[in-house]
Each structure stands twice: as structure tokens, then as C-alpha cells.
Amino acid sequence: MKRRLRRFGRAVLGDRYGAILILATLSVYAVYWRIGIVITDSYTVANALVALADGHLYLDEAVYGAGLETPGTGTVDGRLYGRNYGQVVLAVPFLLFIEAIAAVADLRVALAAIWALLVIGLARSVGWELDRPKYAAYAGSALALTGFTAAIAGATTIDADRHYLIALQMQTMVAAALVGVVCYRLFARAYDRRIGFAGGFAASLSTPIGFWAQFPKRHVLVTLCVVASMYLLYRSREGEVVDVRFRAAAYVPVGVAAWVSAAEGVILLLALLVVDVPTAGRSLRSLATAGATCVASVVPMFVTNYLISGNAAQPPRVLSAGGDGSLARRGDSAAASGSDSGTGTSSGGDAAETVDAFAGGLDVVLGLYRRGVRTLVGESGRLYHTFVRGGYIADVAARDAGEAIRLAFLEAMPLAAALLAVPIVAVRTDFGVRFRSVLERRRLSALGTVDTFVAVYATALTLVYLPRLPLHATITVRYLLALFPIAVYALVRMGSVRRVLSERLDLLGFTYASGVLVGGQLLVVYLWVVDATRGEAVQTHALVGLGTAGLLAAWALFDAVGRHENRFGAVALGLAAASGTVFLVLAGLWHFAFVGGRALPFG
Amino acid sequence: MRSDRAVVVATVAIVIGVTVASGPLVGVSLTDEQSFAPGSGTANVTVETVPDTATLTRANYGSGPYTLRLDPARIFVSTVSGQPTVAYELAVDGLNHTRTSVTFIDESYEGRYDLTFAPSTIAPDRVDRERYNGTVRVYVYDERSDRRLVERNVTIEVKR
């Protein structure tokens, strides 16, 4: 049993750095975890889990929200269905775990105990790694016991009807922590473990991945699928020949993503096909294996669709996140076709209808891209408000309680500012040599393959969603959440960032820690003194983020033209990372306190 | 056994022991039932002071919305039972805007208490005057009655 557990841990986490990363991330997430729902369509997902636990897919009990008809539901044959069933089904193990715990313990106390055990595990692992096991064990035990006592002193009982929501939240928190772990493993293989650890840490704790960790939306799961595909794609190209097993495995996340959200699965699949098929050589057998794996991985989604609408290719919400009015109508088509089949047309399931839905789906995706390009050319203001500065936009704020509670991409992840130097680095790179080496070897390198995949996927995702952005209730451009770890990947790919990580990691870590501890507290004092509203608080984070981003951009640009200032770079990277982390922590502990009570009410 | 290992084992044992003890099998109750029954019980509440001005301030970033702020009202609470509700309201004439902050009180609130007003936001294009008139009201809702304790005219200064 112990050996099997160890083998499983090794397969998922890699090595002790991976274990430290997941324990650290989860114990931080738990501190600002609130048991509650921030966006109304999570009611739908939570009620779907209630239904599934009851043994059926249709919704019949509104445990969450005011009624069953919450955003994202669709009617088929007079029955109401939810959405994101992949997320719902994958939350069942977590639900069983919680029910099992609740059977033998008070759940609040058990959650505090889990946190204490995470801290002890973390202290032990760090202690072994730093060769200070004694000191770490004492400190870890003291912290764990103090936190455990503080969390249960005066705490209230958790109602049994919260279990479903807690299961969904635990699932996304674990997924968010795994995003960091997968990033670590990718970077550690491509470069070294220290660089990998810094990258993985940044992905989970300095980007909005950490914000969405506790809110059960589809984005974190889809993001995990994307980074998993990146990792597996890399592994498949590591050797002299393409590794068929890893190549096929890279398609498995497609099925999971599609099960969670069909549109997201299609975007991932197209990007993977565009990059993988032309670069994997001409072995038909390899292609067939990959294709078969892909088909097998989407079976769960088809089965779910079939059970709901009678049409395997029609997800409960066809590309619901799409662009224009026609898409919105398509989005409601689950309801429309449902009433159709109710009134006597063949009750679905025939092949023609399935093929039709497929062709329609492809058509819709191509239409989305076309629309995205048109937006990119015609309305570049959207690009600015989505990626650089959000600020107050009256139409958007009107649906966000009148406030600007929304961060643009760069405001939410100031670290991305270093990517401004990418064009300069690109111009100074001798592409001729690289291109000739690709031609000579007749294939891309492993990193070249991932680079291409990342570029295609990021462009596709942006084009699909851009026409709708900036949008209310997205807080940190959540539709583009996968771009955050991709930005971390791009950072790690920059030679200048890697140089700073190798040579000045201590200074970077020190700056980061002071930024979070000192800077974070100064920010708390400032917001408290000015009696900031939620919008003002979020916009203060935005401006602080842009400030650190400016510093980082300056360093990156200077570095790109040959003026290497590693110490300055370490400070700039540390401050930018700290700014991202401070937003996560304060948003969870303070700005979004209306969401619900804290899972671990320390003090 | 080494001492650090012993400490870790002891900590884990305590944590798991307490957790199991809290469960239905052993039944040591460590957490309180959530009691949330707004409007239940009774309370005697008197208002001591109410501010006579409020402010509409432009948000401290870019061209944001206006924030309506009002200083706390001081109330005196005595003989509380259950969970009565106290509401602190500001209505702005000319903007068709009313904001009510609700506080659920219990025994721990007895004595002097500062009722806080949660700021609200107003879209920037709606604010076109230098000064608005408004009305502050404090209500108590309990099992005895729903009653208004105070009503007072205030001026609302616009700060750009």
C-alpha cells in the first residue's frame, strides 16, 4: 500500500520539489479559502453535483441558489440539465472523501486537521531538502498545532448541504496546485529543478490561477488540461524519435477538457492537431494510436451528451461562451431541440443529426476565429482593456455592481511585463541558423514543438474570446486563464529570466518575501485608511501591479539590448511576483469576503 | 526514536485524535451550531448621535464611479435577546438612490455601538450637482415591532 502510494505520488508529482510545491500551494490556498460562490453559474454546477450524487443527471433540487433555473441550465424533454458535467463527475471522488470524513469527524475540525497535516508534510519535506530535518520538524509542528487550535476555536459547524460545494472547491484547488506541479516538471526537464520550481511556484501562487483555485469554475480544470498537454507533448519529442506513448497521452487532456466544456476541448484539440500532426513524422501507426487515444478520451463527453440530449455531439451548452448573437442562440439550442424532440420529431440519436451537429460545431469555431480576427483589426481598444489596463468601463461596471472589480491580464500578472522584450530577443536571434537546423534534422526540437503549440493555442483562445472581452464578472480575465501559465512558460523560455533565476535566486526570493509580507501589509494599511470600496481596492491592486510591471519591463528591455543587470532583474521579478500573490491573498481574505465564511476561520 | 520524529508523530496523533473525537462516534462537540435568525428576539436601542453630512467622492483611480460614504451612527443597545436587526439607511434626493446597511445584533453588542454604513457606488454620469440633500434613518426590526428610531436631513457634499 505504502509503495503503491509512493509510486502514485512519484508519477504525479515527480520528486520532492513537486511534493513541496503541491503542499505549499494547497496550504496557502486553504488559508484564504471561503466556502461560497462568487459567480452565479456555479450554482448550476453545484446543483448538478447534487443531482449526480442522487443518481441522475437532470436537476431536481436547488440546494444552491434561489431556484433551479440558474445561468447555464438547459431544458430537454421538460427536464432541466446543468453544465460542465466533466467537472461534476470528476468532483465525485472528492465528495465521497468529504462524506467519509463527515461520517467520523466534525467536518470543520477535519478541514483544520487536513491543513495541519499539509503544514507538517511541507515542513518535513523542506527539512529533508535543506538538510535541517530537526529544525523544520519543530517549526512545522508548532505552526500546525497553533493553526489547528486557532481554526477550531470558536468555529461553527458546517452545514451538510455545503458538502457538494466543498467537494467542487477542493477539486479546483487541487487542480490549481497541479498546474504549478506540471509547470515545474516541464521546466525541470527542459532546464533544471531550481528554475522549474520557481516557474511552478509562480504559476500557482503569483497568477490568478490562485484566485480561481477556490471558485469552482471550469477554467482551472481546462488550464490544467492545457499544461498537461504541453508537458506530454514535450516528453513525446524529447528523444531522437517521437515517443508514441507520450504523443498519444498528449491527447487525453483534450477529452477531459471537452467533457468539462466542449468549446474549450475543441480549441485545445485544434491547436494540438495543427502542431502535432505535421511535426510527428510519417508513421501511420503512431498517428493511429494518437487518434484512437483522442477518440477514447472524448467518449465520456459523448456518453454524457447522449444521456442528456440523445445526440452525442450536442453538449448541454453548445459553445455557450461564443461570440455573437447567433452563437447565443446556438447556446440555447439545447433547449430548442429539446422541445422539438418532445413534439414528435425523431427523439434524437440518429447519425445524421450527430454529423450535422459536428459540422455545425466546426462552422461555429471557424466563425469565431473569423470574428476574433475582425475584432483584433477593427477594435484594438478591446485588446488594450483586456491585456494592459482594465479600469472603469461604464457598460461593464454596470453589471459588476457599478464598480471596476476587474483586472486586465497585465494588472493581474505583472510578471508578464518581461515578455515585452520578446520581440527584441526575436529580432536579435539568428532565425536563419535555427531554421536550417530544423530543415537538416527534419523536425522541431522538443521545446520548439511546445513553443509552436503554445503560440497556436494562445492565439486561438484569444481570438475566440476577444470579441466578448472585456466582460463583467470575469475579475481576472478568467476566460483566458490558460494564458497565465503559458506566460510563465514564455518567461522561463527567456534566457534573461533564466540567468537571473540561476544566479540571483536568493535575492529574488528575499525580495518576493518582503514584497508579500511588508508590501502586502502596507497595502492593507493604505486601503484601510482610505476606507476603500471593493472597486477602489481592486483598482489599487491594478495600479500597484502596473507599477511593478513597468519596473520589470524596463529591466527586460535593457537586458534584451545587452545591458545585463541581474540584481535589478531579481528585484523586479520578485516585486512583480509579490504583487500577484498579494492580490490573491487579499482578494480571498478581504475584498471578496461577501462570498462566504472562511473554511478555516483562524482567529 | 529521534526527537524531531517524536514531535512530528505526537503532533499528527494530537491532530487526528482531536478530529476523531469531534466526530459523531465520540461526540465531543468542538464547534457551535450556526444560529442565524435575523429579526428574532427583542432589543432596546436608542440613537445617541447621527452624522449630519455625507460625501460623494470620486473613486481614487482614473474616471471611476462616485462612492457614497456616511460616518457611523452611535447607538446604545441594551437587553438583547435573539438576533434583532438594526438598519442604517441613507436616501439621496435627486439621485433616486437609497442605501441600507443592516447589522444583526446579539448580546455581545450591548452598550455603545457604532453602526457602520457600507459605502455604495453611483455611476459617474449621474452626479451633476455640487450638493445633494438626503435623509438618514435608523430602524430596528425585532419580534416586538418594526420601528423607526430616528430620521434626519443631511447634506451630501460632492468631492471631485
Image (cartoon, grey):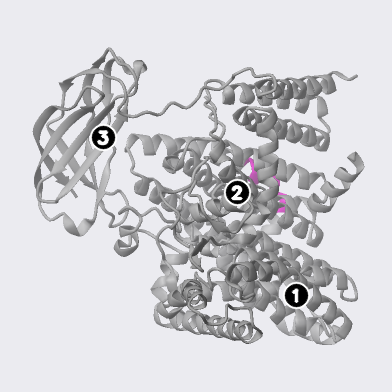
Label number found at residue A42: none
Label number found at residue B117: 3
Left/right of residue B50 with respect to residue A17 in the rendered view: left
| Amino acid identity at mark 3 | Phe
Callout 3: chain? B
* Image location (x, y in percent) of residue A178: 70, 52
Judge the density around disc 2: few (<14), some (14-19), many (≥20) Cα neighbours within 10 Å: many
Residue A436 picture quarter: bottom right
In 3D space, how far apart are the residues under numbered discs 1 and 3 (Cα atoms)? 57 Å
Left/right of residue B135 with respect to residue A451 in the rendered view: left
Name the residue carrying label 2: A168
Foreground residue among A156 and B14: A156
**Residue A506 located within the stretch drawn in magenta:** yes
> Of marks 1 and 2, which one's residue comes earlier in the chain?
2
Specify whether disc 3 shares its chain with disc 2. no
Q: Which mark's residue is nearer the viewer, 3 or 2?
A: 2
Name the residue carrying label 1: A295
| Amino acid identity at mark 1 | Val
Left/right of residue A333 with respect to residue A310 in the rendered view: left
Point 75% across, 78% down: residue: A276
